[in-house]
Image (cartoon, rainbow, N blue to C red):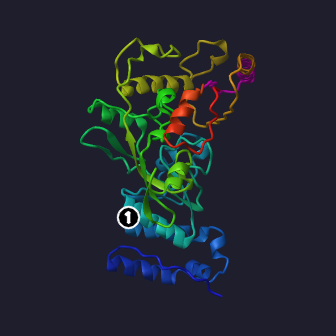
Amino acid sequence: MATTRSPVCLNIADETASIISSKFTSDENLVAHLSNPSIKRHPIPALTPLACWTFQILLGTNNVQYSSTDKSLIAVNWSEACRLEAQCVVSPSSTEEISLIMKIISFLHVSFAVRSGGHSPNPNWSSIDSNGILISTSNLDSINVSPDNSMASIGSGLRWGAVYEALDSYGVSVIGGRVPQVGVGGLSHFSAQHGLAADNVKDFEVVLTSGEIVNANADTNSGLFWALKGGGPNFGLVYSEPATYPEAFAPFAAIPNGIVRISPTNATVTFLSTILGTALAMLLRGKYCNLPAFRLKTHIISSHVYRSAASLIDDKFYNETSSYFLDTVNRLQADGIKVNIAFTLQTIPPSLVAVSEARGGNQMGIPSQAH
């Protein structure tokens, strides 16, 4: 018994449509699965190569590449554990191309993952194996600033360093990540005053799994708007993120000295994030070895494991955790295991949550008490 399948409406040239139609009609896997009553219950890996072929016809070979022949496509991912070889990597350049991709993926029932900055430490979050397709947002790198400098529309494929640098010429910045290499989103140096990056978004342009292009903001699709603020790629593909600018940033003299000492200055957010981002990279490569526990041979870390836990502020607990951390590093070093481990405490003040709630809240459920 054949299942009822809604037609896929693609705005493409007749000649291209004829080529795709001929291929689909002759593909035995597609014909077999269209006649399978359980087709909607699970992804169909056998159709993934057909999806990749279709994308190459529609988007061109430059925008659809096979990871098995170009390892650099996968090396973008921060953690080696997440460098899975997708069947192909598709890099759309517009909302319309994303819509086209999602319509084909939904029709063929193939698995997919979406990668922006590629910093997720979890396999299959921004990576996928050869049974699926990886959608890379790297070509979605536009930055548009409103005439009055009050709003910026930021492509979801950008890294924060590029965003900060582009906005320097306007004399403004946005609430974004603290490390320049990460994708848009995250915790800012100024989140205690202005909330998370997601809390400063005024509107998301989103492509749903059906291929429909919608906007999500406080007035339109407000439920989706709330869900996207911390929901990752679970609800749609974000094309651009308009964000408002905070007031002029105060000098950085009030920032406590940490690994890197920065003299009081009126430097830009670009300067700050670059300095701290470089410091973090050097720490992970063993450049900072002030403690005996960190005296490991310098090497580039490629495989990362990330864990986090939340607690109320507790000096005793922090000291015990720090001691356990140092003991663990010393033990690993004594066993000859070459590994660098970073232990960080991140305080979340009530003011951050208050700003988030004042701007509509988000789905992360951060408690309002200091922790």
Q: Position of residue 172 (x, y in %)?
A: 32, 31
Specify whether 307 is left or right of 15: right
* 48 falls in the magenta region: no
Quadrant assignment for the N terminus: bottom right
Which residue sits at x=62%, y=32%?
368
Q: Is residue 100 above or below residue 361?
A: below
Specify whether 317 is left or right of 79: right
Q: Position of residue 165 (x, y in %)?
A: 33, 33
Q: Position of residue 305 (x, y in %)?
A: 65, 36
Of 115 and 51, nearer the camera is 115
Disc 1 is placed on an element classified as helix
Callout 1: 10 Å neighbours few (<14), some, many (20+)? some
Which residue sits at x=48%, y=40%?
359
* 334 falls in the magenta region: yes
Which residue sits at x=41%, y=17%?
252
Which residue sits at x=60%, y=26%?
346
Of 331 and 326, nearer the camera is 326
Of 182 and 20, nearer the camera is 182
In this picture, which residue range is highlighted in magenta? Answer: 322-346
Which residue is most to the left? 147
Q: Is residue 266 above or below residue 229?
A: above
The total of numbered circles placed on residues is 1
Res 303 seen here: yes
Which quadrant of the figure has residue 13?
A: bottom left
Q: Is residue 66 above or below residue 228?
A: below
Q: Position of residue 163 (x, y in %)?
A: 37, 37
Res 69 seen here: no
Specify whether 101 is left or right of 245: right
Residue type indicated by callout 1 = Leu
Quadrant assignment for the C terminus: top right
- According to the image, label 1 marks what residue? 59
